[in-house]
Amino acid sequence: MKTKIFGVVMSILLFASCQNTLDLYPLAEPSAEKWYSNETEIQLALNDLYRIDWWQWDEDGVNVNYLSDDGFYRQALSPVKSGTVTSQWSFSTDYWRNGYKSIARANRAIAALNSATTKAKVSQAKLDIYLAEARFHRAAQFAKLVNKFGDVVYSDEVISIEDAYTKGRTDKKTVISKIYEDFDFATKNLPTSYPISAVKRVTKGVALALKARFALYEKDYRVAAEAAKACMDLNQYSLHPDFANLFLQSTKNSKEIVFSIPRSLELKITLGPTSDKITRNSGGFAATNPTWDLFCSYLCTDGKTIDKSSLYDPRNPFKNRDPRCTATIVEFGQPHLGFIYDPNPYTLQVTRISTNTKVTNNDNRVNAQFASFNGLVWKKGIDDSWLTNGRLIEPEQVVIRYADILLMYAEAKIELNEIDNTVLDAMNAVRARAYKAIPTETSTYPAITEKNQISLRKILRIERRMEFAMEGLRYMDIIRWKIAEKVLNQPIYGLLDPVDLKAKVVDKNLWFFAGTPTIDENGIPDFTEMSKTGLIKNLVPTSWNNRQYLWPIPTAEIQINSNMKQNEGY
């Protein structure tokens, strides 16, 4: 792994050191010619397009920016969930700025690669690959911007600072066609794979994968289905055999990962220091937590929602659930990061695994006021290795994996109402993997057989939520399904304060859940009736604003450019 990422990471560090110069003074033709004088310099320049800053998730679970209903940070709300997004929101401003920084670098690379000087020194076959790589990155960044902002400023050329002050937004339809052109050029010219020993770079499959994602987000279902199917037909990817193991930092180069950005402790490209997802018994804060909404969305092992399954027991809510539930959220009474995890207010001591001794239970709100407010803590991707190296960790930054290709294909076909066995096969491959089952052995897991469009749409949406929790995909799912106005207008619920929790819930034999929420057509739990009992606590109300389906153009852009128009409502 170190051999494969060294070139990319080192060049990222190199370019980071001169980032301000590159941003303020776009390369003119002479300096571009000097830099792109050989293949090594070309590859170094292209490596900067893999900088992790350009590929951050919408929410990463290690800060307060929870945009979706999958997680929350104590009683704090991001501007999205409080309905207070403005054109000065730093998260969206950075998103815009980083997108255009990457695009500017891609455009400079493309201009240099097309120059007579570079063409005289590099073969056309190699140039086509390098151009494909640069055009892929340009397409991917424009795709992200269109998804969030709608009409965006489009340029496929190096522009002067003077032009930058006057260039307005381009109609989204025009930009979409340009994005498809770039993705198609990349698909045609990128290799299907690279040697195992080579530095990881984008391939034909990556271009198809991100084209499929963009098309799906824009409801262009025919293009999404065709791109996803073409990616599947490359036969380059397969599902990792163990769902839980896939997300550990020790798992590198899985065949499931279509595209990722590497991290490296050795080269100081890390996630962390990380404390908010680490439990308090283990020295963390447990301040960022899965929501009850997410927890209740996991199906039971009969394939039914918890409000419809006879297998569901609110007193023992982890039992008989889809295996991805306990792979994502720590089960009560089970070992986690060196201790038995148990938030029950009467469990004042827990076992330290290494010594088999009882210690104060700081994951209990009787002992620690700021222990998890709803009793749940994250497990996905977290193991004992998170406690070493000063809590600096090096998991791959996964941009897209094969399970997403399969479910995107299935969703696009469902929306086209072209439901056949290929759709069920794709969905069942993902579900069977969760159970470590063979997809064709349908008696070993709750295989999907439904072919009605409305029913299968609900199953697909729940499947995505179970599969991709805390991978940065949920926010765009609720945006493109136009359900944010429902799911982000519901309170975030949690446990009563310890004294009331003991008297009203635990002493009444109602621990852990004092009821069962109903699950709607989108797989969303409704806690309204449970809330009326007074046995759960409204931790914080959310307040979605429909203008937020598109993010605002940053204030700085509006102030310096009279041709830049703001999105409606801001």
Image (spheres, grey):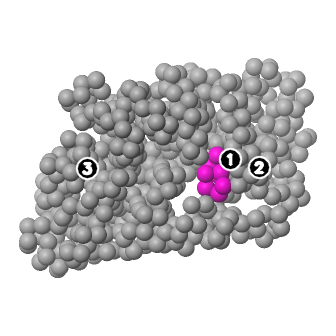
Alpha-carbon distance for marks 2 and 3? 45 Å
Q: Residues within 10 Å of mark 2 (few under 14, many from 20)?
A: some
The residue sitting at 56% across, 44% down in the picture is 219
Q: Which residue is mark 2?
A: 154
Look at label 3 and name its amino acid: Thr
Q: Are marks 2 and 1 in contact (CB under 8 Å)?
A: yes
Tag shown at residue 142: 1
Position of residue 183 relative to residue 125, above or below, is below
Q: Which image quadrant for residue 41?
A: top right
Direction bottom: furthest residue: 499
Q: Residue 331: x and y, percent?
A: 22, 53
Viewer-nearest residue: 546 or 27: 546
Alpha-carbon distance for marks 1 and 3? 38 Å
Q: Residue 210: x and y, percent?
A: 58, 38
**Span colored in magenta:** 141-150
Tag shown at residue 322: none
Look at label 2 and name its amino acid: Tyr
